[in-house]
Image (cartoon, rainbow, N blue to C red):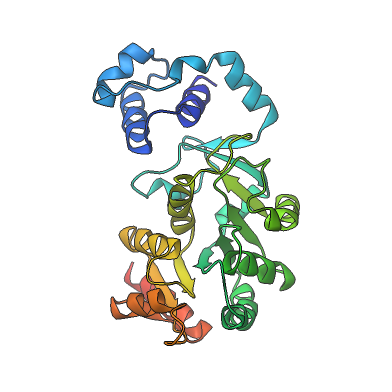
Amino acid sequence: MEKTLFLLRMSVTRGIGPVTKQKIYQYAKKLDCWQFSAAELFPLTRGKGLGDWDNWTNDRLQEILANQQLITIEDEAYPEQLRLIPVPPLVLFYKGNLELLKREGLSVVGARLASDYGYGVLKRFMPEMIKRQFVIVSGLAKGIDSYAHQFAISNQGKTIGVIGTGLDICYPKESGNLQIEMTRNHLVLSEYPEGTPPAKFHFPMRNRIIAGLGQGVLVIEAKQKSGSLITAQQALDYGKEVFAVPGNILDGRSAGCHQLIQDGAVCAEKVQDILDSLQLLKKIY
């Protein structure tokens, strides 16, 4: 319990970044000591301090533990693939079926303003991906994310949503019913406790979890500058395969996908392109 309270306190403290939190976690783990004052940890923050560390009393933390489901990086149920990324979340709050984290996942990202073409790609790809027992991982955003979750569900598959707010908040509101459905029969994850509103910097952080959970990342309709490309780059940094679906060269919706293909991503014109690449990686490693 001492270890859980320490990691939860680290997770909810505002004013220190994830890299510093990871450094403090590694320091505590090395010493196998899980009780520190802010003064004792101050040298690890390069003089920036520990934000609101002292505001999180044990009573406040115990209240979170009593009312919210969570796993820490020290728990057996924590997904092994996330332990391997450079800055893993110390705590994951969840609603739904945690067993889905044990299955192979494929992350799917793309345009929020998806076209009929993007919708059609997912409609064609998803039955075969579900048949191959992939759990579909995405971010519950509008467009490709929501389509990916919905097609996974409609094809009797399983899906995981990773959000950038507390689990009691549906953002965007249009995804509210889908998020509720997924908390009941699938899985929704967040590294933020309930009550945390959306913030711009939460979503790039959320993307690293999406990239980390999948065996690879499938990108559909990404513009030249988009959050989907951030997720793709993170996947590449983690040594994972990126699959980009080519699109229309005239409307710019797939310009980011085309750039990924030029840079060495797998051109995914059919599901078999994804399967062949993942099978080859398994043989190599």
**Which residue appears at 57% of the width and 82% of the height?**
121
User: Residue 115 falls in which quadrant of the image?
Assistant: bottom right
Q: In the image, residue 215 lies at what x, y percent? A: 46, 64
**Which residue appears at 75% of the width and 56% of the height?**
177
Quarter of the rendering occupied by the N terminus: top right
Residue nearer the viewer, 54 or 158: 54
The residue furthest front is 251
Q: Is residue 137 left or right of residue 123?
A: left
Residue nearer the viewer, 240 or 218: 218
Position above or below: 194 against 181: above
Position above or below: 154 against 230: below
Position above or below: 259 against 5: below
Quarter of the rendering occupied by the C terminus: bottom left
**Which residue appears at 59% of the width and 59% of the height?**
141
Q: State how many labels appear.
A: 0
Residue nearer the viewer, 202 or 130: 202
User: Residue 46 falls in which quadrant of the image?
Assistant: top left
